[in-house]
């Protein structure tokens, strides 16, 4: 059988409480001075204060860590969103200003957006070039058609004159 607390008694001469331990098969033995009730209450208050301060420190540390992690994740996403909106308005340089160096999913997404932006810019420039050359080709083709029309009209005029001349000759004979 294990030793157990037998009792706590108060010594009126010193004003302290004494704890007595009962060991099986022997008399109770005084093993520690507990102190007065007021010192116990004071120790409890001190421990409660220490526990509250520790809890507040952990809460503050958790809040700070949460804010840092949130900023680490949300800042690149906000930058990507702004760049995507700029790109949708035709600003192909928007993604060249991105500064996302992470190698995680957000970094891969940013790299993909940068590649897409470059490809869209090249495609847009190619379309503009096609548009310019198409206008030139249409103008050139229109000139050629007008020239062909003038040639056909001139040939038609000669044919009509030949027919009139032939008709005059035929009537004269």
Image (cartoon, rainbow, N blue to C red):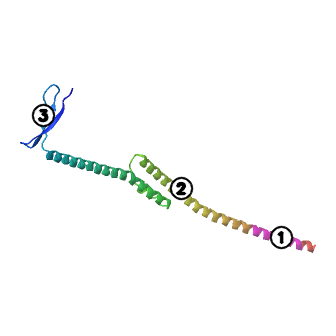
* N-term mark: 2 or 3: 3
Residues in magenta? 152-168
Q: Which residue is mark 1?
A: 162
Magenta stretch: dominant secondary structure: helix
Residue 153 lies within the magenta run: yes
Q: Looking at the image, which residue sits at the far left?
A: 13
**122, above or below 39, in the image:** below
Q: Residues within 10 Å of mark 1 (few under 14, many from 20)?
A: few
Q: Residues within 10 Å of mark 2 (few under 14, many from 20)?
A: few
SS for callout 1: helix
**142, above or below 113, in the image:** below
* N-term mark: 1 or 2: 2
Distance between the alpha carbons at the discs numbered 2 and 3: 90 Å
Q: Nearer the viewer, residue 52 or 9?
A: 9
Q: Quadrant of residue 130?
A: bottom right
Q: Which residue is mark 2?
A: 123
Q: Nearer the viewer, residue 172 or 141?
A: 141
* N-term mark: 1 or 3: 3
| Residue pictured at 15% horizontal, 45% vertical | 37
Tell us which disc is closer to us: 1 or 3: 3
| Residue pictured at 10% horizontal, 42% vertical | 16
Residue 35 lies within the magenta run: no
Q: Which residue is mark 3?
A: 31
SS for callout 3: strand
Q: In the rendered view, does 167 fall on the left or right side of 28?
A: right
Q: Nearer the viewer, residue 14 or 46?
A: 14
Q: Nearer the viewer, residue 33 or 5?
A: 5
Give residue 134's position: percent from left, percent from top. Answer: 61, 61
Distance between the alpha carbons at the discs numbered 1 and 2: 57 Å
């Amino acid at each position: 059988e294990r030793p157990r607390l037998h009792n706590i008694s108060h010594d009126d001469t010193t004003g302290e409480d004494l704890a007595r331990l009962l060991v099986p098969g022997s008399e109770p033995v005084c093993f520690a001075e507990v102190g007065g009730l007021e010192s116990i209450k004071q120790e409890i208050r001190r421990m409660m204060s220490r526990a509250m301060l520790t809890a507040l420190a952990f809460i503050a540390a958790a809040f700070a860590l949460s804010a840092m992690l949130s900023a680490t994740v949300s800042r690149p996403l906000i930058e990507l969103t702004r760049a995507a909106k700029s790109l949708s308005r035709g600003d192909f340089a928007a993604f060249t200003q991105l500064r996302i160096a992470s190698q995680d999913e957000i970094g891969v997404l940013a790299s993909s957006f940068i590649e897409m932006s470059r490809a869209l810019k090249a495609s847009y420039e190619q379309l503009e070039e096609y548009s310019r050359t198409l206008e030139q080709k249409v103008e050139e083709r229109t000139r050629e058609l007008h020239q062909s029309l003038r040639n056909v009209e001139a040939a038609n005029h000669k044919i009509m004159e030949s027919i009139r001349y032939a008709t005059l000759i035929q009537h004269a004979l």
